[in-house]
Amino acid sequence: MLGMCRGRRKFLAASGALLFIPALTWLYLSVGGFQVKPLPASPLEAQSSAPVGGVGERQALELRVREMEEENRVLRRELSRPRQSLPARLPSGGRLGNHSRAHSEEGTGDSEGQRAAPVGNSSYCVPQPVVDKCETIHVAIVCAGYNASRDVVTLVKSVLFHRRNPLHFHFITDAIAQRILSSLFHTWMVPAVGVDFYDADELKSEVSWIPNKHYSGIYGLMKLVLTKTLPSDLQRVIVLDTDITFATDIAELWAVFHKFKGQQVLGLVENQSDWYLGNLWKNHRPWPALSRGFNTGVILLLLDRLRKLRWEQMWRLTAERELMSMLSTSLADQDIFNAVIKQNPFLVHQLPCFWNVQLSDHTRSEKCYKDVSDLKVIHWNSPKKLRVKNKHVEFFRNLYLTFLEYDGNLLRRELFGCPSKIDLNSENLQRTLSELDEDDPCYEFRRERFTVHRTHLYFLHYEYEPSFDAADVTLVAQLSMDRLQMLEAICKHWDGPISLALYLSDAEAQQFLRYAQGSEVLMSRWNVGYHIVYKEGQFYPVNLLRNVAMQQVNTPYMFLSDIDFLPMYGLYEYLRKSVVQLDVANTKKALVVPAFETLRYRLSYPKSKAELLSQLDMGTLFTFRYHVWTKGHAPTNFAKWRTATTPYRVQWEADFEPYVMLRRACPEYDRRFVGFGWNKVAHVMELDAQEYEFVVLPNAFMIHMPHAPSFDITKFRSNKQYRVCLKTLKEEFQQNMSRRYGFAALKYMTAENNS
């Protein structure tokens, strides 16, 4: 009996312990203040997960409990399914982590995945369909105007940076964007990248009947007609806005096409703002949409199925019906896409929201990511762009700036193992370079002549129509970053159009953009064309830059200047009058503008020839380079110019390099001359060989402003091999002149030997 009582007491004590320990644990966690703080999972989480006091700690604990409950629920659902449908493997630890939480309750997950497998911001649990290594991924982008052409480059860089597959871009552009982007891709020469352009002007009639209040204008409606615009044999395409930045390989998005089921033809991410809920302000009335609607900044289009479903007829009928009451679209094509989906929800395959993290004000974008690795696509879909309000905007801005300033030359990467379409330009370039002797001491000089520099024409807005009198003149010059301070002064001295080639890195191009946008003088001038030639190699390609600027001149005449010169006030009008007076249109004339210089950084610029002569006599001004390179401008005959009242002709002499105005259709500069030395001399020699007359203008002048010596002139002065190579290139140029112009070119050989 005593043994039985003792046994009962032991049983009761053990039972009490089992009940007391969990109760004590719960009491400790709730009241005693839990001190163990988990490390933040990411930099993003670290910014927003610092609890304050016991309340914050309890909230963090409650959140973690809910997460664990959710994970247990998912695990139970997985275990209840047939064994063959279980995921291939789980993350380390054998359980689902934070990255695999479903987002179905937020409406931001994959609609198919919510039924089939846990959906989240990581691909641990769901085996991703493999995209063939050499499968070409097609991307369509609508791009119009100067600003959009500049913005889209950052998108392209982010795609190229992560990609492992061949790409084919389909650009729907206006004439401006096509001119800019065709030149950019032609000079970029990225392997395994194809580009096609489609004229947006031909598509305007398809959508111009739709009133649109969105800032994108008529081009914001062009995505509606892609089934009709793109090649009929193209089956699928990813459609992107220009304000997109990729943070992953685009092949991952391309693989989502394999998840489309039934009649799904559109892959879209849910809109992350409250726009389509209709509660932003009183009487706010958006277009019809399913729940929050969908954002069209990123679209997956199954073109072949859309054509079979008569997409053109479908969206037109929907738009016509809704416009009877809505009168216009507020969000361009997005309103019409959503109205169609509202009627036909079976068309849409909902993408996880990390494929379009929308950074406009007051969105739910923060629900799309838990960790940096979750981010796939960032969409700056607010008119504020980088100034948008978001808890982690600094992180996103830095990511964007990384690609904005990234050296695009580094993206010329080969895709090994994939046969690529033969590019004749690239093949010819490689053949030419292979013929050069790498042991030649002047190899780098010779190679530079054939280097293809990535070129972005019209980096800023440009708007100018030449005057009707057919005597208009464009000032042509080239510069690097250290001469930006001359731009405002030149614009004040020259009223006419200007064509400038700037030799910059990608990062410097953005510095220039900020400089220009902060200048009232430059922003008020839409007749200045800025053409960026991106840095590559060790030399300053001065003659390539001049040629680029010359090629973009749209007036009948051009004044070939240098960035360090300030033209006299009124020179633009004076040259236009001289064109008519000297009949330059019907004769081969090069009008010489006499060049002077000052050693003073602060100069009272002469307003007339009389003032200039006075300063010349006082020693404030000098004839250009009289003390170091007299031969360059001696043939101008400054003594005669002092008293001249009418234009007079001068003869070519060795090393003559005046600044001239002439017809646009003139010889280009010889690219073999880079850096310092003979770059202008060779051009003037060729003008003389083609029988141009050099006519000095009696009332024109320009003044060279002082500056620190350039890097190239320093190399010329200090490097003997540099001077030897320059002499070799001069001799080769003269031999080429003899072959091209025959007996008439012998005088150049003789003049050089006598000088």
Image: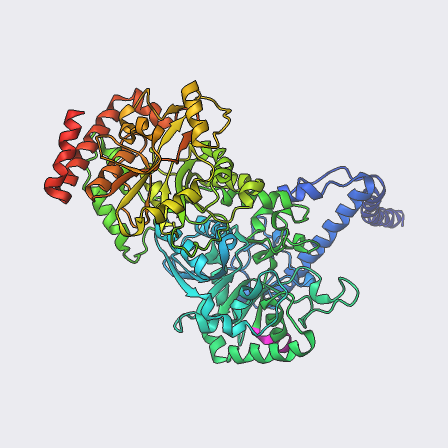
From this view, report whether residue 510 is shown above or below residue 289.
above
Question: Does the magenta-highlighted stretch encompass residue 136?
Answer: no
| Coloration mode | rainbow
Q: At which x and y percent is residue 460?
A: 49, 48
Task: Tell me if residue 413 can be seen.
Answer: no
Q: At which x and y percent is residue 629?
A: 29, 24
How many labels were placed on the picture?
Answer: 0
Please tell me which residue is depicted at 14% across the width and 38% down the height of the picture: 745
Q: Main secondary structure of the magenta part?
A: helix
Which image quadrant is residue 327 in? bottom right
Please tell me which residue is depicted at 65% across the width and 49% down the height of the picture: 388
Task: Identify the image quadrant of the C terminus.
Answer: top left
Left or right of 425? Residue 465 is right
| Foreground pick, 662 / 61 | 662
Please tell me which residue is depicted at 45% across the width and 34% down the height of the picture: 481
Q: At which x and y percent is residue 310?
A: 50, 80
| Foreground pick, 125 / 516 | 516
Please tell me which residue is depicted at 38% across the width and 72% down the height of the picture: 233
Q: What segment is highlighted magenta in the picture?
A: 342-347
Left or right of 231? Residue 663 is left
From this view, report whether residue 655 is shown above or below residue 85.
above
From this view, report whether residue 526 is shown above or below residue 446.
below
| Foreground pick, 526 / 91 | 526
Task: Tell me if residue 507 can be seen.
Answer: yes
Left or right of 436? Residue 221 is right
Q: At which x and y percent is residue 576?
A: 40, 47
Pick out the residue farthest to the left.
Answer: 743
